[in-house]
Image (cartoon, grey):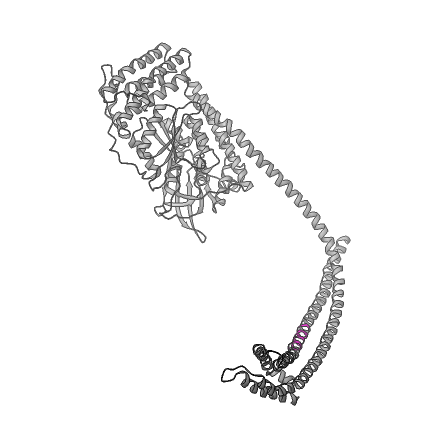
Amino acid sequence: MAAADDRGSLEPTIPTARRGRATWLGVLGAGLILALLAVAWLQVRQAALLRQAVEVADDDAVLLVYQAETEYLRLRDEWSRSIDPRRVLDTAALQLRYDIWISRVGLLHNERIARILADETEFAETLLRMDRFIRRADVVFGAQDGRPPGRDDLLELEPELMALGQEIHGLSLRAAHHVGEQIARRNATVQHHNMIGIGLTVSLSALTLAFALLALRQMRQLDRRRAALEELAEHLRQARRDAEAASEAKSAFLANMSHEIRTPFHGLLGMLSLLRETGLNQQQVGYLRTATESADHLLAILNDILDMSQLESGRMVLTSTPVELRALLRDVEALMRPQAHAKSLALHIAADPGLPERVLCDATRVKQVLFNLLSNAIKFSDRGAVVLDVQARDGEGAPELLFNVTDQGIGIDEATLGTLFHRFVQGDSSRSRRHGGTGLGLEISRNLARLMGGDITVTSQPGKGSCFRFRMPLKPVAAGVAVRPQLGEAPPPPRPLRVLVAEDHFVNRQYMGALLERLGHAAVFAANGREAVEAVLAAAAQPFDIVLMDLHMPEMDGIAATRAIRAMPDPSAATVPVVVLTADAFTETRDRCLVAGMNDFLTKPVSPQKLAASLRRFFGSTGAGDFPPEPAPVAPPGTADDSPPLIDRTAMDLALQAMPRERLAALVHSFLDQGPQLVQRLRAAVRDAQPLELRVNAHAARGAALNLGLAALASTAETLHEGATHLPAHEIARHVQRFEDLLPATRDAAIAAGLPQPADAAAV
């Protein structure tokens, strides 16, 4: 207790001492300020007095009188030479000297010289005599008859000129004496001012010294405190450097690992996709599905970690471009609907009619936030509907775009709401174990929303569902501003498109090239998925407008290639629209393509109308010529065993809309010419028990035959593709033989249909 009392009695003493020092410093400082003001006032006054003394000086008066005397002497000398009979009379030189002297005499008629010599009566009389002489001389030098002055005239004026010499010299002496007195007075004034300045300096120095001594004592105490603070600050700086170094090391590690992990991941996903096409029993299909889902889940975790690292390091930069808002919402719906359908949930997308058609935003990041919120809503709901409602509202000082994601799921309690956006925290641990997840999705989404200038908030009731609100600034774009192609739709104006066609069969490449040429677009070709990925990656300077991607290709199929494109770091490459080309029209295949990130689905045969309609969905009017409506499919008359006809007239007519008959004929016969080599590959696959090789070759042949309208060959190739994994070898061999037998018959049917074999096979 005593110690406490002593501490209590000492505590008021410290502030008192500090207040005392502060008071003395204040008084001394105020005195110093007053002294400085007084010194400043005196210095200004002394400077004004000194300036006045200098300004009123008459130094130049001596110069004017001296110049007048000098010119007078020069005139007198020239006058004497002019009246000398031994010399030639130089009237020009005499006239010049006379004019100069007159100008100097004129300068003597001013108030300053009159003020200096106002008490001298001789000055006025001298000026009068000089003026009198000048009037007489002007008559001689400016004669009416224009003759120059003669020696007689000059001799007559000489005595009067000579008489002026003594008076002018006396005037010069008196002016010099007057100015000399002024200089003496000025020097005395300056000396007096200097003494005053020295006195002020001494006084100010003494006052400054007293203040410095008192301030020095205070500074020593401040130095001790500053030393302690600097030591603490150095510890903090070192700790910050260590933390930043650790963060940079982590970011560098994640950046390196992203490349090292993603590269084999793409290969893994591609191989899993190819493995799905081989002959597998039901149990193996289940194993493969589990492996694919696990790989997709692991890749999603990796992407979350890398996004979090970029947000932490501040390296994530938004790329805002004009975006078709409703096209963006359609993309979100297309990707999320399969997930909702798998859980028997209704998915509704509602948009306020008053929303602008185009907005300025980073479409990729907005979709990422919406995908995460909708995915969570679907994941944690077992019944009802998931709704995305988009509205425009007036925010705090600026309009905002509001996305409301509402579900009827399990809801979130108050305790969980407080930690919902924290890293590695999930709303329901039991469901987290069942569904997986990193716990980073909501934090990444909120950080992205804040990076856009908005935020994410949530309201929820356990057992009744949740509502996540994602808001961001609403920046409408005028209708005339061009909109960059997004995943769903891109705007007019009509323009030629740069299209990448990924297709493994040469006939299909030629066919798609002809279609695109007919539509007025330029095609670049890739023979497999890996080449397609490399082409998109290498086209940074001149990116593709759209990619037409075959689904079944060697090395890397269309789904794996699309995943690789969507994972590219360049937003322009990662968001290029991808349209799948396949002869497989099953709903399961369509869902797989949409989940992989594809944007549209075209089944073979690809007609000009189908391709033009797909391009219009992305780019509006493409500037191509109009095609007649696609005819409704009519079942052609079959043979006795209901086998398809050799030639599908409807498909052939559609192909003739895209290219001249000669070019179609060249393509058909080129395909038939390659038939024997295809048959050899099919037989080798049967002989070596390679069902995957058999399926790949049969699928490629089927797609090409469908595009060219070769119905019987397409049907046989489809049978080989579907039965490669389960039909016995002798049955497969029988279908291969049928394919070979159909080649000459199909050629005859093509010729009969008006597609003659070209003389030069290179015409293709």
The stretch in magenta equals 43-55
Foreground residue among 665 and 277 = 665
Say above or below: 754 vs 487.
Answer: above
User: Is residue 213 found inside the magenta-colored segment of the image?
Assistant: no
- Is 611 in front, or is 442? 611
Side of 508 where 640 appears, left or right: left
Residue 38 location, quadrant: bottom right
For image coordinates 77% across by 55% down, the residue present is 6
**Above-or-below relation of 566 to 240:** above
Q: Please, is residue 695 above or below residue 406 in the view?
A: above
Quadrant of the rendered structure where residue 577 is? top left
Q: Position of residue 329 (x, y in %)?
A: 38, 40
Residue at (49%, 39%) from the top-left corner? Answer: 442
Q: Where residue 281 sits in the image (x, y, percent)? A: 42, 17
Q: Residue furthest top?
A: 730
| Residue at figure coordinates x 46%, y 23% from the top left | 271
Residue 83 location, x and y as percent?
A: 61, 82
Write down the quadrant of residue 760 in the picture. top left
Q: Is residue 523 left or right of residue 24?
A: left
Q: Quadrant of the C terminus?
A: top left
Report x, y in % for residue 514. 32, 29
Q: Nearer the viewer, residue 268 or 157?
A: 157
Say whether residue 704 is left or right of residue 156.
left
* Residue 52 on the magenta segment: yes
| Residue 582 visible, this orientation | no
Q: Is residue 77 above or below residue 725?
A: below
- Classified by dominant secondary structure, the portion drawn in magenta counts as helix
Observer-nearest of 247 and 392: 247
